[in-house]
């Protein structure tokens, strides 16, 4: 298992997202799943950026709220 740190760039800002998955393909698919769970209406995002990938034990995924200044 791996833990992935993504940033989703959309029209309202950036949403940091953390996913746990076995493969890169599964991680990118889970980003879509977690975003659909988090937002009432899915934002029109321009880019999904993978920032970090680390090996870990078993786990799950979640979306962190975006912080703005």
Image (spheres, rainbow, N blue to C red):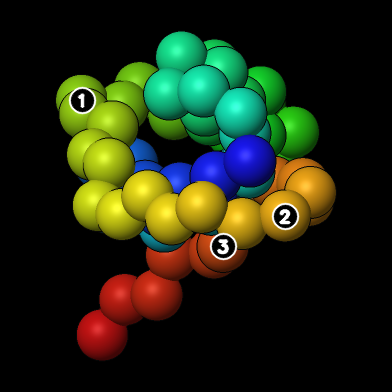
Which residue is at 52% across, 23% downward?
A: 23
Rounded to the nearest angstrom, the CA distance separating label 1 from label 3 is: 18 Å
Which element carries disc 2, helix, strand or loop?
loop
- Location of residue 58 in the rendering, given as x and y in whole percent from the top left corner: 79, 49
Which residue is at 56% across, 62% downward?
A: 64
Q: Which mark is residue 64?
A: 3
- Location of residue 62 in the rendering, given as x and y in whole percent from the top left corner: 68, 51
Looking at the image, which residue sits at the far bottom?
69
- Location of residue 54 in the rendering, given as x and y in whole percent from the top left corner: 43, 55
**Image depth: mark 1 or mark 2 in front:** 2
Left or right: where does residue 17 sit relative to residue 19? left
For the C terminus, the quadrant is bottom left
Q: Is residue 5 visible?
A: yes
Q: Which mark is residue 57?
A: 2
Rounded to the nearest angstrom, the CA distance separating label 2 from label 3 is: 20 Å
Q: Is residue 6 above or below residue 10?
A: below
- Location of residue 11 in the rendering, given as x and y in whole percent from the top left corner: 25, 38
For the N terminus, the quadrant is top right
State the residue position of label 1: 46
Which element carries disc 1, helix, strand or loop?
strand
């Amino acid at each position: 298992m791996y833990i992935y740190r993504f940033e989703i760039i959309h029209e309202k800002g950036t949403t940091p997202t953390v996913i746990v998955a076995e493969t890169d393909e599964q991680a990118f698919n889970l980003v879509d799943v977690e975003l659909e769970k988090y937002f009432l209406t899915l934002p029109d995002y321009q880019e999904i950026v993978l920032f970090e990938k680390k090996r870990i034990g078993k786990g799950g995924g979640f979306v962190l709220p975006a912080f703005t200044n």
